Amino acid sequence: MDALNIKRITKNSKKGITSVKATVVFKGTEDLTESMKFPLKEHSSVKGAIQYFIDEYKKKGINDNEEGDIQAIEDCFSKTVIEVNLTRHPFGNEIEVLFKARTKEEKTDLSNRVELLIGTPTFKKILNQLHPAFWYFVQERQNNLKKEKELEEREAELNKREEEKLHKQPRGYLKTTAKLVGKATDEKTLFSLPEIMPESGGNFLREVISRNTAILGNYLLQLWQQNGGGELVINNLSPIAEIMGNSNYEIKIYLLYLGGYVYPIINKDKDGLTLTTEQLFKVKFRYNSKVADKYKAGNYTEVGSGLTKFIKDEPIDSIEITPSPLFIKALEGEGLGNVLVVNDKFIKLALSLTDIAYKILTYSASNKPSQKIAEDNLVKHLGLEKQIKTQGRPRVRATILKGIQELQEKEHIKSYSYEEATGMYLFTYSDKYVKHQDLKKDKKLNL
């Protein structure tokens, strides 16, 4: 008894493609073991599956009748049929086998040809192997692909939303960090501070800051805006430490450098650019009553400067942080103003960079997307005058170009060049991390 019968055949022709649909009724169920061995990944289409089973028949050896059947199938598939689809009915053992063909034949001739094709014993055997195992695995694969697609679309949407979330960075802070970031020679390491007594005359001026300290400042400006302004209260340093890739103690040290000293800040007034010395942030370390009672006598070790300190080896209850008034005004559009950057993404980029690349990032972000600047001026804005004297201009130039190349690899810099004859740098940055107003026209942004 045949494993299947042809119930009906329908045909249709549209836009040069003739479709012949055969409703096939399977009798009984087959052992799924052999069909489960079918290499689905390599032959995921029905047409590919049929070809696979034909090849398997040939390997095992075929008789004359089967050879004729297989020849007819292969001829039909190679010359006529361009696609085969299976559709399972919600009842019984019926499956519709849809053949799509591009042919000059009349619909009647094609339907007759397909009826003869699927009526051959060999083709029935092949179809029977597709049911129900192949159908089951195709369905599972389609479901998995659908789920994967939905997950990819959801992830892409989340990434898009994350990218569209923006905050402002004060241009004054960007220009200041571009100039001041470097390695401080008067510190044992960038991650430690000596236990400091109040300095004579209250001289807390510093003219260098570590890259990570500067980046923490970038991140605090983001958090301060997300918090709605006012005073940023931090009760747990761990989330910040995780973003920064540091320990909680190292974050406290960075906070000391941000709030414990004054720095030359670049700003703008009605007469032009100005330099003033200010704390970058005001930082307060607060302790609970137990710690306060413990040290009523004042016998404790302080870490920090006269402007900002914390008690060594004691848990902090909270930290209160406020940006410099100059930066707050810049965020409101005064002074040098501000530039929009992508939440977290800008910070993660900064953390991945070398010192020179970070300096160029913050300097470029504080300006228009397309910039042309003389080497002497760029050296001044990046605070590299001393390096010119000690290392020589060619070496410093090579360092700058290396930093620009690094930013191009990270897709911040779109293009750049250096003109040897004129000593001019030309570079243009993208909108991947910085959304300058010249780049954000006609784009919907989410603040």
Image (spheres, grey):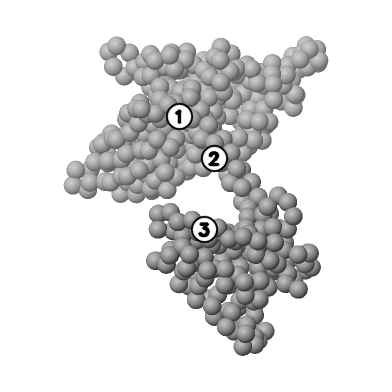
For label 1, the residue is 341
Residue 433 against residue 396 in the figure, above or below: above
Residue 397 position in % (x across, y down): 32, 46
Q: From the viewer's perspective, is 428 left or right of 447?
A: left
Q: CA distance from mark 3 to mark 2?
A: 41 Å
Residue 100 against residue 209 in the figure, above or below: below
Q: Classify mark 1: helix, strand or loop.
A: strand
For label 3, the residue is 11
Q: How many marks?
A: 3
Quarter holding residue 242: top right
Residue at 70 percent of width and 61 percent of height: 25
Q: Which mark is residue 156?
A: 2
Mark closer to the chain start, 3 or 2: 3
Classed neighbour count for the residue bearing mark 3: other residues with Cα under 10 Å, few (<14), some (14–19), many (≥20)? some
Q: Classify mark 3: helix, strand or loop.
A: strand
Amino acid type at mark 3: Lys
Q: CA distance from mark 1 to mark 3?
A: 59 Å
In-front residue for pair 443/43: 43
In-front residue for pair 234/23: 23
1 vs 2, front mark: 2
Amino acid type at mark 1: Val
